[in-house]
Amino acid sequence: MLECRDLSVFYGFHQALDGVSINIKSGEIVAILGANGAGKTTLLRAIAGLIDFDDDDDYGEHYEKYQNEILFNGESIFDWDPHEVVELGLSLVPEGRSLFGELTVIENLKLGAYPLRAQKTLSQNLEKVLSIFPKLADRRNQTTRFMSGGEQQMVAVGRALMSEPDILMLDEPSLGLSPILCTELFNAISEIREANTGILLVEQNAKRSLEIADRCYLIETGRIATEDTVEGLKGNQTILRSYLGGEVRFANRYSERLTTKTILSEEISELTSKANKKQKDHVDSLRTSFNRPDLQDREKTDG
Ligand SMILES: Nc1ncnc2c1ncn2[C@@H]1O[C@H](COP(=O)(O)OP(=O)(O)OP(=O)(O)O)[C@@H](O)[C@H]1O
Ligand SMILES: [Mg+2]
């Protein structure tokens, strides 16, 4: 179990996090949603040990009124070094992936197995990663620089999994991905959870993340504005409107205009098939009218 208590982060005089408290258990998917600049990346970086609190002597007094505690299975990991945090079982897939572009898929994945906790189980973990992302097995010797954004994202997630994390943190994993690769990625995230890994998911794609998440935190200018289960959130029209937009059209132009609430509460596959059926009916009716004998006769006469 990972817990942040009353966490604050300052960049110089600029305060990016103001008393943030969150928690996540193994096997849970917890989504962190919020607008640009809300502090989502800062939160993940603070947990991962990428914010150097010690270095902030000039601004030390800013922190005094906060507890600033990060606990992992009861142990304080606040201001630990990143490699120590990974060794304990917390892995971050950073925004923008940071792969080694000149290295192959397999080489990048093996680099993820550097922590002592995962060295002995490297080959089992590699097998697991390649079964979650079969595409990577097909392209194991490809230089990652030449792969698509979605494939590179899979390598980045795979590399983090190679450290055998108890909690996996993902910063905007779907950014710039095609809808198909996005679906593959979100399916993979659900599969990773099945192995009892906790997943802290920062996403712009609120709809997709709420489809797979158990709970959600909404973060607004450095503060947690709302915390709820996804089920609870579906009933909250104000939140849905402000964070997830109003009505949207789903699947194709033959679908009805649906509210976010409907989209969240209905099976996506059903909505898609309904819309596709409408589209097919429309096309069929057009075809029927084209094939009307009177129209065909007219064409013949015209020709
Ligand atoms: N290294 C930095 N130095 C100074 N300010 C920073 C730094 N990194 C982030 N900030 C500021 O801290 C605030 C939170 O930034 P953060 O990157 O955590 O937001 P975010 O929610 O991840 O946004 P986005 O959705 O754009 O990724 C923003 O106001 C940002 O400008
Ligand atoms: Mg960010």
Image (cartoon, rainbow, N blue to C red):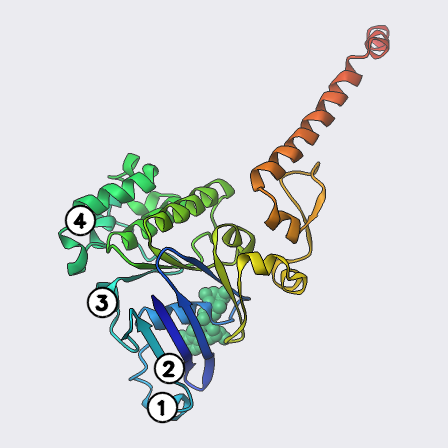
Q: Position of residue 8 (x, y in %)?
A: 42, 81
Q: Which residue is mark 4?
A: 122
Q: Are marks 3 and 4 in contact (CB under 8 Å)?
A: no
Q: Mark 4 or mark 2: which comes first in sequence?
A: 2
Whether the residue under disc 2 has CB within 8 Å of ligand 1: no
Q: Amino acid at mark 2?
A: Asn
Q: Secondary structure at mark 1?
A: helix
Q: Mark 2 or mark 3: which comes first in sequence?
A: 2
Q: Mark 1 or mark 3: which comes first in sequence?
A: 1
Cα–Cα gap, marks 1 and 2 = 12 Å
Cα–Cα gap, marks 4 and 2 = 35 Å
Q: Secondary structure at mark 2?
A: loop
Cα–Cα gap, marks 1 and 3 = 24 Å
Q: Which residue is mark 1?
A: 60
Q: Amino acid at mark 3?
A: His
Q: Nearer the viewer, mark 1 or mark 4?
A: 4
Q: Which residue is mark 2?
A: 68
Q: Mark 1 or mark 2: which comes first in sequence?
A: 1
Q: Residue furthest left?
A: 120
Q: Is residue 296 left or right of residue 221?
A: right
Write down the quadrant of residue 49 in the picture: bottom left
Q: Which residue is mark 3?
A: 83
Q: Mark 1 or mark 4: which comes first in sequence?
A: 1
Write the residue at 54% across / 57% down.
230
Q: Is residue 51 above or below residue 229?
A: below
Q: Is residue 179 left or right of residue 235?
A: left
Q: Position of residue 37 (x, y in %)?
A: 51, 70
